[in-house]
Amino acid sequence: MNKEFVILLFFIILVAFALLAGIILTRPPSPPPDQLVVAATIFPLADITRQIAGPHAQVVQLIPSNSTAHSFNLTPQQIRQLTYVVTTFAIGHGLDQRVTDATLKAIGDERGVNSAFKTLPYSTIIVDQNITLREFGPNLENSDQTDSDHESSNEDPHYWLTVPNAQAIASTIAQELIRIDPTNTTDYQTNLTNYLRSLDQLEQELQQLASQATQRNFIAVHDAWSYFAQHYGLSLVATYEPLEGRTPTINDLQRLQQLIQQYQIKSFYTEPQKTTSAGIRLMQQEFELKIMTIDPTGGIDPHDSYIDLMLRNMQAITAAN
């Protein structure tokens, strides 16, 4: 056996071990045999679910907080983890259907072999029970929308951005957790009661902040804030994007400039994923607006919560005007 062959053989073995180690390190750990695993499409749902589930369920967030539902695809690591999921909590109405469809396809008829819940049929729960939905656009003064980029749904899916709707969502999640895991019913009910109480306190803080706003009219990058504005006595006058992700025309921008002057708007609200876009530079340089960031989904900070997210958004809107 010559020296070159030994070196080549050693190199092949080393590469094989490296690949094997990579597979092992990137493979998500299997949950304990009695661990319930559920999924939620976006951070607000995942956080609310964790508050209700406590230690009784592992919650998988499908859409990372730095991504959008329109562009995100499930990773191989997530697909492997999804074999243990019993239920996915989703917003629906076009916002996250691509992800829930992909989840259903990934799961198929398989279940994790060590899951105590593998005999339960997989289900997707749209968490809009007892929530009054609104349509996109009719209250915006620069709106000429006849459809929506939210996958053919003209219903506004951003309904989690009011506390009463979050309370309804929490109740829906608790009901489903009790259905699939009745052994821990008492804990789920207790967690729900405590969380609803925390949301009551949040609602009081938000209403107080909103009542102190000196400027109730605002303009945002796109129409994610109509539920929020309507419930808290604010007014989303217009949006930079006529539709989600659609570039405005010259006429759109002229109308937007008129509204900025009419309502004496001083600030423009973008979102974390859009802070470097050409449109933001236009609003800052040409329209001379102060650029502020509000976030409909949150979760970028690992210590974030739905409650903190809502407080930050209200503080940003009421403090800047």
Image (cartoon, rainbow, N blue to C red):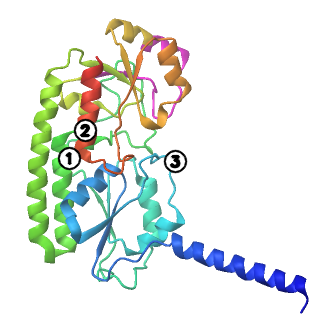
What residue lies at 48% left-to-right and 31% top-to-bottom? 275
Can you give x and y, in whole percent of width and height, for residue 225 in the image? 31, 32
Q: Residues within 10 Å of mark 1 (few under 14, many from 20)?
A: many
Q: Quadrant of the C terminus?
A: top left
Which quadrant holds residue 244?
Answer: top left
Q: Which residue is labeled 3 in the image?
A: 71
Q: Which residue is labeled 2 in the image?
A: 310
Q: Amino acid at mark 3?
A: Ser
Q: Amino acid at mark 1?
A: Ala
What residue lies at 64% left-to-right and 75% top-to-bottom? 19
Mark 2, secondary structure of its residue: helix
Residue 301 belongs to the span the image colors magenta: no
Mark 1, secondary structure of its residue: helix
Residue 239 belongs to the span the image colors magenta: yes
Q: Residues within 10 Å of mark 2 (few under 14, many from 20)?
A: many
Which quadrant holds residue 29?
Answer: bottom left
3D distance between C-alphas at marks 3 and 2? 24 Å
Q: Where 105 falls versus 165 (above or below)?
A: below
- Residue 179's tag is none
